Each structure stands twice: as structure tokens, then as C-alpha cells.
Image: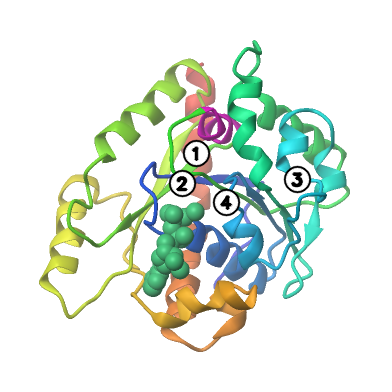
Amino acid sequence: HENFARPARTRYLAVANQKGGVGKTTSSVNLAAAFAEAGMNVLVLDMDPQGNASTALGAEHGADTLSLYDVIEGRAQISEAIQVCPDFDNLDVVPSTIDLSGAELEIAGLDNRVYLLRDQLQKFIAESEKHYDYVIIDCPPSLGLLVLNSLCAVHEVIIPIQAEYYALEGLGQLLRTIQLVQKSMNRQLVISAIVITMYDRRTLLSQEVYQEVEQHYASLLLKTTIPRAVRISEAPSFAQSVIAYDSRGAGAIAYREAALEINKKSNNIFKLLDRLKKEQ
Ligand code: ADP
Ligand code: MG
């Protein structure tokens, strides 16, 4: 893991795309595990009421578990809801429960409704004895209040795009939403990477999707693509990341490489964020 460098300060990433099934959760979980394996301190926030990231990281998320639902609604602190991933003792998880799906309506009337997660996260980070290198938020497949809360709590967005027909459909709307957040809610927000998931190098379609994204977003697109691999989709049923479940497989290797690419962007991202802060 000698190629990984600890970022100079905490990197806050949201993995977002309003389309379901594009690999948000898989990417959140496996990037987090790859960072943890490389010795980084990592915190994953599962913002999807489905709780798939919680499952894949071996976190409890039954009905009586303290979760991000309680955190968002101010009944609990992150420090009370946090769990440790069984496979990596430097990977912490705040799980979600299905109750979180009710939160959007319940917080809709609050003045600070888009900053609830940010405020809780900042409080936790300020009080935590541990320094986190990466905080990764797995977003639900929408552009609703839970996603806005996520985008206001981070400085970077990672967008997974599935190598499929209509891959870029909806991307414009996602980018406009991110821009809107940037303008009016969180000035220090940049897109730091686009990652192509479920890539099948034997198909022309996969290559076409890669090339099309490259044409428009070359500077954001990761060189590493995530292959479509059975092991990647099996891992969550063993409550594991593919990094732990099939450490030497193609899926684990790809997510490690993607994590390394993201890690290498640290200094450039910090420069960009500092510039945005000055312009504020
Ligand atoms: P999202 O969080 O965007 O809804 P997921 O990460 O849950 O998407 O992925 C959707 C489905 O595709 C899941 O069943 C997951 O296991 C599977 N999947 C994701 N990435 C891969 C991959 N690279 N190879 C095979 N299956 C994958
Ligand atoms: Mg998901």
C-alpha cells in the first residue's frame, strides 16, 4: 500500500447519482474498504434508507439500531450511532434503517433542513479523538432532501456511471443539481471523479460509454473502470466488501486502483477548494 498517501486533511466525499442500480453503494463500500486496507481512517455514512451499505460493511441496522435517521432528526449523535466494520478496525460506519425514508417529510419544514447532516458531522469531527482521512456518504437514488443534506455535508462528489444503454441519461440533471447546491448552499463543492461501473471490456457498448464520458468529462473520468464481476455482487450477501471477500479478484483490484487514483487527486482538490473558499 506504499502508493497511498494520507491526505493533508479530511476528504469528504458523497457518492451520488439519482439513478438506482448504477453502483453507488458498491463503490462507496469498496472505495472505503480499499482506503481502510491501505491504512486510512475511514467513516462511511449510509444515507440510503435501503441500508445496503450498512449490510455490505457488516453493520447492524435493525429496527432498534441507532442510525442516521436518529442523527438527522437530532435524537442521537453520530458518536452514539457509529459502529466498526468487522473486517477493518479503522473503518467506521453509521448505518441507516428503513425509518430514514420518513425523514425527508419530517424535516421538510425546518429552516436548516439541508444542513442537518453537515452540522451533526462537523460536531462529531470536532469532538472526535480520531482523525479521519476519508468520510464517504452513500447517497440514495434521488435528488431529494437526503441527497441535498449529503451534498451540503461534503466537499466532493463522486459519480458512478453504469456502462449501459442510456448511461448518460439524467447526468445533466445531476450536474445542474450539484451546481445549484454549489451556488446557494455549499460553495466548497466540486465533482472530483466519475467512475464507470459494471464495465465489460468485451462489449462495444462499454467502450462507447467510456469514450462518450471521456469526450465530455475527460478531467473527471477515472482511468480505472470497475469490471462487471460476480464476486462484486456476491460480497454483500456475506456482509463484506469485495476487498475483504475476494481480496485478489478483479473487482478488489479495480476498486483498489480507483481508490488510489482518487487518493492521488488530494492536493489538486484541496487547491481547488481553497480557491473556491477565497472567492466566497
Ligand atoms: P446503487 O447503489 O447505485 O443503487 P448498487 O451498488 O447497489 O447500486 O449496485 C446495483 C446492483 O448491481 C447490486 O446488486 C450490485 O451488487 C450490482 N453490482 C454493482 N457493481 C457491480 C459490478 N461491478 N459487477 C457486478 N455487479 C455489480
Ligand atoms: Mg445504493
Residue 2 shows up from this direction: no
As shown in the figure, which amino acid type bears the numbered disc 3?
A: Ser
- Of labels 2 and 4, earlier in sequence is 4
Point 23% across, 52% down: residue: 167
Q: Is residue 182 magenta?
A: no
Q: Which residue is mark 3?
A: 67
The Cα atoms of the two marked residues, 4 and 3, are separated by: 12 Å
> How far from the left and from the top, in percent, is residue 131?
78, 51
Task: Give the farthest residue toward the front.
Answer: 63
Q: Work out whether residue 48 or residue 194 is closer to the camera in this orientation and state it.
A: 48
Disc 2 residue crowd, few under 14, some 14–19, many 20+, Cα 10 Å: few
- Of labels 4 and 3, earlier in sequence is 4
Q: Is residue 85 left or right of residue 226?
A: right
Task: Give the farthest residue toward the bottom.
Answer: 248
As shown in the figure, which amino acid type bears the numbered disc 1?
A: Lys
As shown in the figure, which amino acid type bears the numbered disc 4?
A: Gln
Assess whether mark 4 and mark 1 are in contact (beta carbons under 8 angstroms).
no
Range of the magenta residues? 145-153
Q: Secondary structure at mark 3?
A: loop
- Of labels 1 and 4, earlier in sequence is 4
